Image (cartoon, helix red, strand yellow):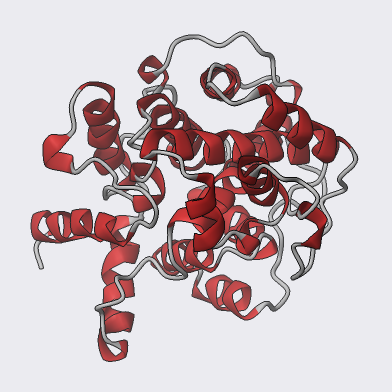
Amino acid sequence: MAPKVVRLALRRVLREVRHVRPVSYGRATGQVRAVYRQVERDFGMLAPPVALHSPSPPVLAASWLMLRESLVAAGATGRADREVVASLVSRANACPYCVEVHGMALASLGRSSAASAIAEGRPVADPLAGPLPPAARTELTAVAFTFHYLNRVVSVFLGPSPLPSSVPDSARAKAKAVLGRFLKPVEDASPGLSLPLLGPGSRDFSWAAGNPVVEDAFSRAESAFASLAIPASVREIVERELSTWDGSPSGVSRSWVDAFDDPAVRLALLVAKAPYQVDDALVAAVGLGDRELIELVGWAAFTAAAHRVSRHPTRFVL
């Protein structure tokens, strides 16, 4: 299939998004359309993990700033090393969708052995091991931050695979190869092109010192999340619970959130600490509209990702 035909087909994958209805490419206007154009130009396709944020344009833009300026933009590290970090973080967070997507990207970059090892849970040579130049460490930390965020959001709104459920098993290998080719680096990936999509931020990220574009991107994203209308009770409880959390998995039981009566608090806590435990019944119990649901989940995911990186600034696959 020609790239244009494939791109049009991939836009239809947005129908696989759960709980919310993303804005279609043809109906996108303003900030949403500007983001969509950059996503297709720089990421090769209208990626559902980004587009699902579209009911809230500021959160959509924030998610794209983080993804583009960490994974896509040119810098001191290669795309393959960044994809390994994205895959390892996704595996640690039990996000099969993201593991599969970035396994395809690794295969397209000639790193099929790493993709297979990550998918099978086998050890992989970690590009983050050992001493790293400051510029490389900043870029790979940004990738880790981004995927601690995206894994949580994807676990709520997408299924276990990036391929539509209608694709038969016999065609999945070929479909993965096609998708993988779309995920290759673009020729013009100049840093900072996404920054005008959001207004300036005010927070300094110490781990991003030395890379003003990355620091600016995450500062703008942080300001977007900080401005959301999240209930004070939800903010206080999530931040309090995260303050003593060491990142350990919460297991299969949800008894640790049962003490909270407010379903919005339970959802935000699960997104932050155990997104794989979120189910349809809990999302329905929260009863939020599309924009409000995206903003609650996005805020909890960003808060958790910031906690993970700030708590362990020298560790990446946490």
Placement of the N terminus among the 4 image quadrants: bottom left
Residue most toward the bottom? 170
Q: Residue at x 20, y 53 (%)?
A: 11
Residue 110 can be seen, yes or no: no
Vertical placement of 316 versus 217: above or below? below
Q: Residue at x 25, y 39 (%)?
A: 41
Residue most toward the right? 244
Locate residue 78, reporting x and y percent. 53, 47
Q: Quadrant of the rendered structure where residue 196 is? A: top left
Locate residue 309, reporting x and y percent. 75, 38
Residue 33 falls left or right of residue 142: left
Front residue of this view, candidates 49 and 22: 22
Locate residue 44, reporting x and y percent. 28, 49
Q: Quadrant of the rendered structure where residue 90 is? A: bottom right
Residue most toward the front? 261
Q: Quadrant of the rendered structure where residue 157 is? A: bottom left
Total labels drawn: 0
Q: Residue at x 58, y 51 (%)?
A: 152
Residue 43 can be seen, yes or no: yes
Front residue of this view, candidates 234 and 121: 234
Residue 203 falls left or right of residue 228: right
Q: Residue at x 57, y 41 (%)?
A: 146
Locate residue 108, reporting x and y percent. 39, 66
Front residue of this view, candidates 15 and 219: 15
